[in-house]
Amino acid sequence: MPQVTPMDSINRQQPEENHKDLQDIQAIKKIQEIAGKNNTCFFSTYLKTDKPMATRPMAVQKIDEEGNFWFLSANDSYKNLQIGQDSRVQLLFQGSAYSDFLSLYGEASILTDKERIKELWNPMLKTWFTQGVDDPRISVIKVKPIEGYYWDNKHGNAVAFLKTAIGAAIGQTLDDSIEGKVKI
C-alpha cells in the first residue's frame, strides 16, 4: 500500500505557492488581518483533560500590536474557572464562508486591571455587566498566542471562486488558497 501524506497530493498539484509559514511580525500581521475581520471567535478551554473541550463564542475587544487578544469576562464564569485550572486555550476564527480561517493556541491569564477594563469597555457589554464599566464581576482575559494555523485566499473570494470554477471545468487544481503555520 503506498504511503500517503494527508493533503500532500492536493498541495503538490497546485501550480502556484499555496503554503507559507509566518513568524513574529508577519505572523502578528496575518493574525490581526484575519481575526480583525470578525471580532467573534470560538474560545475553547479544557484542551488537555479527560473532559470534552469547552467551547463558547466570545467577542474580541482588542488585538494589540504584540498579537495578544483581550476579552472581558465575568469573574464567576465557567471559562474563568477553567482557565484557572489550565491556562491553555484555543481560539478559532472564521471570517467568511470561503476564507479567513485561523486557529490559535495560546496561554490565557485573568486580570482585574480597572484601567484595562475601561479601555476595553463597550456600552453593549452592559447586557451582561448590568452595573456598567464598574460592575465588580468584570475580569479581563488576555490570550498570548503561541502558535497556530491559518488558511486564506490570496486574491479575495471572487478571484478564488473564478479559479476554482475554471479548475473544475478543465480538471486542474486551480485553488487560490494560502495556508501555513503562525508562530509568535
Image: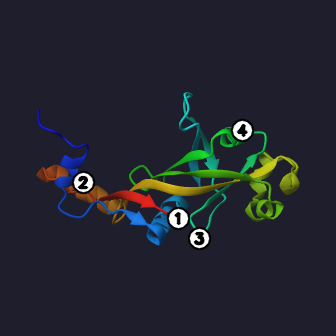
Which of label 2 and label 1 is nearer to you? 1
Q: Is residue 121 above or below residue 85?
A: below
Q: In the image, what residue type sits under mark 3?
A: Glu
Separation of residues labelled 3 and 1 (CA atoms): 9 Å
Number of residues whose C-alpha sits closer than 10 Å to that of mark 3, classed few (under 14), some (14–19) or many (20 or more): few
- Residue for point 34% across, 57% down: 179
Which of label 3 and label 4 is nearer to you? 4
Separation of residues labelled 2 and 1 (CA atoms): 27 Å
Q: Nearer the viewer, residue 41 or 107?
A: 107
Q: Secondary structure at mark 2?
A: helix
On the image, numbered disc 4 is attached to which residue? 81
- Residue for point 36% across, 58% down: 180
Q: Are marks 3 and 2 in contact (CB under 8 Å)?
A: no
Q: Are marks 3 and 1 in contact (CB under 8 Å)?
A: no
Q: Secondary structure at mark 1?
A: helix
On the image, numbered disc 2 is attached to which residue? 164
Disc assigned to residue 32: 1
Q: In the image, what residue type sits under mark 2?
A: Thr
Q: Position of residue 144 (x, y in %)?
A: 59, 57
Q: In the image, what residue type sits under mark 1?
A: Gln
Name the side, left or right, on which 133 lies relative to 33.
Answer: right
Which of label 3 and label 2 is nearer to you? 3
Disc assigned to residue 65: 3
> Which mark sits nearer the N-terminus, 4 or 1?
1
